[in-house]
Amino acid sequence: MVAAHPRIGVAAALAAGLAVLLAGCTTGTAPDVASPAPSETAPAASATPVPTPTGDPVYNPDGTADDNLAYFDRVNLDLESGENQPSGRKIINNLVDAGFDKSAMEITADKTAINLDTDSIEFTVLIDDRCLFGQFGAFKYRSVVLPVLETGKCLVGKTRSINW
């Protein structure tokens, strides 16, 4: 029973300290703090309207990666509308069906080493010295045009073989 007394003392001290802290949080008046004034109006809209594209983007086999980015995006967004994260095979087949050169493509794996879905799938199409880079993941679809790497590839590391 003697060993229990120090524990009771420590527990009582902790409880008393906690009570003091809680009392400090709930008693007294709040200091005067000025609230920020609400904004009076929303910022004015830009005087120059943003042009809207006329018609759907089309593939330009003689164009650059920058020329074909809008089409690349349209093709991938159309695929995404049916699924959150399509498989690598569906991504590649969709790009081939849209006119892109399969031999110029790279893609990361869509399964982990223990056969779970990956968080994202990156894929590229090399056009001259630039890469159309796309990614499907939890955030949906993203894309960018990047320069080709010194290796002549667009992706770093191990990529999935496109052998179908």
Image (spheres, rainbow, N blue to C red):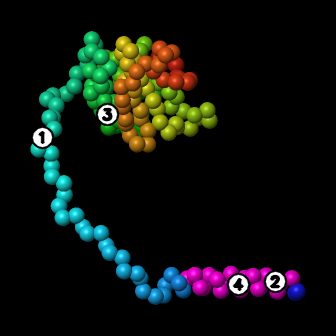
Q: Are marks 1 and 3 in contact (CB under 8 Å)?
A: no
Q: Earlier in the sequence, mark 1 or mark 2?
A: 2
Q: Is residue 27 above or below residue 96?
A: below
Whole-angstrom CA distance, mark 1 to mark 3, is 28 Å
Instruction: Choose between 84 and 130: the one closer to the eye.
Output: 130
Q: Which of pointers 1 and 3 lies earlier in the amino acid sequence?
A: 1
Range shown magenta: 3-22
C-alpha distance separating marks 3 and 4: 62 Å
Q: Are marks 4 and 1 in contact (CB under 8 Å)?
A: no
User: Could you tell me how far apart the alpha carbons at marks 3 and 2 are, in whole angstroms?
Assistant: 67 Å
Query: How far apart are the alpha carbons under marks 4 and 1?
Result: 68 Å
User: How many C-alpha atoms fall within 10 Å of the one at disc 4: few (<14), some, or many (≥20)?
Assistant: few
Q: Amino acid at mark 2?
A: Pro
Which residue is at the front of the view, 119 or 40?
A: 40
Residue 136 in percent (x, y) is at 41, 35
Is 81 a magenta residue? no
The reply to whether residue 88 is visible in this rendering is yes
* Label 3 Cα neighbours within 10 Å, binned few <14 / some 14-19 / many ≥20: some
The disc placed on residue 6 is: 2
Q: Label 1, label 2: how many angstroms apart (C-alpha)? A: 76 Å
> Which of pointers 3 and 4 lies earlier in the amino acid sequence?
4
Mark sitting earlier along the chain (3/2): 2
